[in-house]
Amino acid sequence: MEEAAAQVKELEKSKAALHIEATKAAKAVTRIRNELKDIASELTPTQQRLEFAEKQKVELEAKLKKEAEKSESLEKRIQKLEELIKESEERLAAIRQQEPRDLDMTREQEDEYERIKEIAERETAPARQSRSHHQKDLSELKSKINAVETDIQDGESKLKRLEGELEKALEEKSNTEQHIQQRTTDLDTARNELQDKSNTFDTALKRKGELEQRIQALNDKKMSCSASKRMIEKEREQQRLIAEMKEHVPGVHDKLFNLQSCPQHKLRVAVAAALGKWADHVVVNDYETAKRAIEFLKKKPKAGQMDFLPLNTKTKKTDPRLRDFGSKCRAAIDCIQVKDEAYRGIFEKALGDTVITDDLEEGRRIAFQVCPAQNLRVRVVTHRAEIIKKNGNMSVDSSAGEGGGRFEASELEAIETELEALTKEYGDIAHIELTGSGEREALERKIRQLETIIQTQSTRLDQLGVSIKGKERDRSKTTDIVKNDKAKLDQLNKQREECEAKIEQLSNEILESEKGHFAELSAALGVDDVRKLDDDIRKEKKRREEDESKLQRQIAKNKTDLANCQRTRQTVGDPAKLQASVDKVESDMIALKEKEGKLKKDKMDKEGRLKDKEKQAKEKKDAQDKHDKDIKKHRETLRVKQKAKTELENELASARKRINQCYVEMVDIIRQCLMEQVKIPLTVGSMDAFRPLLDEVEVLDRVAGAATPSQTPSLTLNDSHDAPEGFDALQ
């Protein structure tokens, strides 16, 4: 017991030393976490500035592209207008350079023409007066048509300008709405993130308890798994080799065992035993693929032996009679789920002649009674991996339990992965608590900035809405005016056509009436009708004047449009300045990215150091916990020994009490004998009656190690048959 107490004392000293080391490691972890907090407080604004710069760059590039497209469109428009002006001026010059036709007559013929003309005009005066009236109406109609066309052109120009302004306003409104939507999304994200940070900070301690419970549950589940660590490592090594083989040898699939699953846990051992040697066969497309895989394995000296199973192997379907053996027996192929129906054939080859029974008794019945009666030869496997072969030999697959554990290998690996993640999360909680304050302050600043931006953009959006409504009203009004003008123009054109037709009719009538008067003169001039020729020449001159006037108006309009386009071009943003802004933003982004990269590198270094320190702290903590367990164990051992000692001391005290009682009784007997002078020899039999009691006291003294002969009355027995007289036998 003293040795146990000394061990406890020594462990207490070791615990104190470990506590100091663990405290130092915890302080180092706290210091690195504080450094990470400082880096995070600097990294977050840098990333926000970088994000803003990236958005600004995108906006500037979009604006630059838009301005470039607008500038290009204006240049094309200006070039087209210049070409139209040049073409119209050339046509106008060509018209002006043309010499008008005239009647080639002598002086006498001209006088005769005028005389005959006066006579003919007097005769056709009513028709000419009517034609003159219609010509006047036609002139007025043409003036009205020109005015309406001018109004339509002005209206269409105004509509085009309004459309451009409205399109620009709508685009700005759309961009503003998108900007507000993006900022609102950012604001919601920031608020949610702030709420998440607050919730994370508030629930950190609660999460610790949940993690502890989950880790304990996973450890318990891990202990219950039958898959051994050796098996898992072996499976991982083989899977790594197969994965490498897949990269170099097309047509390699996986191990047969990995291409199926067994949903029922109780059947896994039986399925593993039923698969037997087939479980580790690697499935390939064909024999050629297997040969290439073997050549690949030859280059891997540590690969070991590996068997291959081609998919094109000839197989037979499972006999349907194997499914009719009763509820305690099932076909092995029905106990698994194949991951792909393409593998069904090779599983039929491996398990097609095998059934799984609940116990060996049912297996014997199937193998030795049912199957011979149906002329079937099957292999029987029980839930405990007891196998009855086709030839009737029986065996037990001792490795089937481990094979059944292969189903749990992935589960165990998932448990270990989750344990690792939970342990890391458990360590990250403290880091979250440390860095949460700075991150919340940064998020609050970001939220205030976003709220200000959204408020400003909302005001601008309202202004744009009012402006767009006004422009839409103007556009609608102008559209109605243009529509009415076009209807009016159609009506005027119709009236003009009617008037021109009437004038043409009157002119033909006049010409027909005057044809007889000018027949002699026409014959002298060698023309069919000199009057008609004169009228055609006058019409041609009038048409030239109209064409010239029309071209002049068209040139004036195109020059006006050209001047407007040139003024618009001056308002377009300078691409060079925009490009300079883009370049400046890019240089700022480069600097920010360098700073971000440096901070991230520092963060990674700090996180690496933190991981090492946390690992050291965990090791120290584990060692401290181990010492605590050892101390607890030794203290428990010491407590048990102290309890046993107390019980022994109580038994010793009881035995001493009984001895004292016997001693008193013996003294009373001796005293009585002395008073009555009776000689009672103490025989050997009488002495033997006291021996068990004395032996018990001696044993208790030796076990307890606490009593001494001086503390207890001593009796010495003389077991001689010749006892002396008196009381010499009692000393």
Image (tube, rainbow, N blue to C red):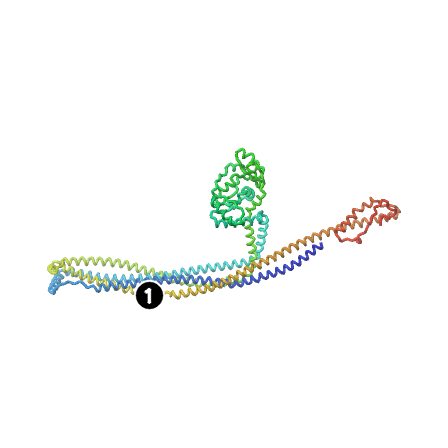
Residue occupying the point 22% across, 57% down: 498
The reply, left or right, for residue 552 in relation to residue 352 is left
Dot 1: element? helix
State which quadrant residue 134 falls in. Answer: bottom left
Name the residue at the right extreme.
677
The residue nearer to you, when weighing 197 against 615, is 615
Task: Locate residue 435, reporting x and y percent.
Answer: 54, 61
Q: Amino acid at mark 1?
A: Gln
- The N terminus lies in which quarter of the figure? bottom right
State which quadrant residue 18 falls in. Answer: bottom right
Task: Locate residue 24, reporting x and y percent.
Answer: 61, 61
Question: Is there any visible trace of residue 341 in the rendered image?
Answer: no
The residue nearer to you, when weighing 294 against 184, is 294
Label 1 Cα neighbours within 10 Å, binned few <14 / some 14-19 / many ≥20: some
Q: Is residue 590 above or below residue 378?
A: below
The residue nearer to you, when weighing 160 against 266, is 266
Task: Locate residue 645, reporting x and y percent.
Answer: 73, 52
Q: Which residue is mark 1?
A: 566
Name the residue at the top extreme.
373
Task: Locate residue 113, reporting x and y percent.
Answer: 12, 63
The residue nearer to you, when weighing 421 against 493, is 421
The reply, left or right, for residue 709 in relation to residue 119 is right
Instruction: Count the labels in the image.
Output: 1
Question: Is there any visible trace of residue 83 in the rendered image?
Answer: yes
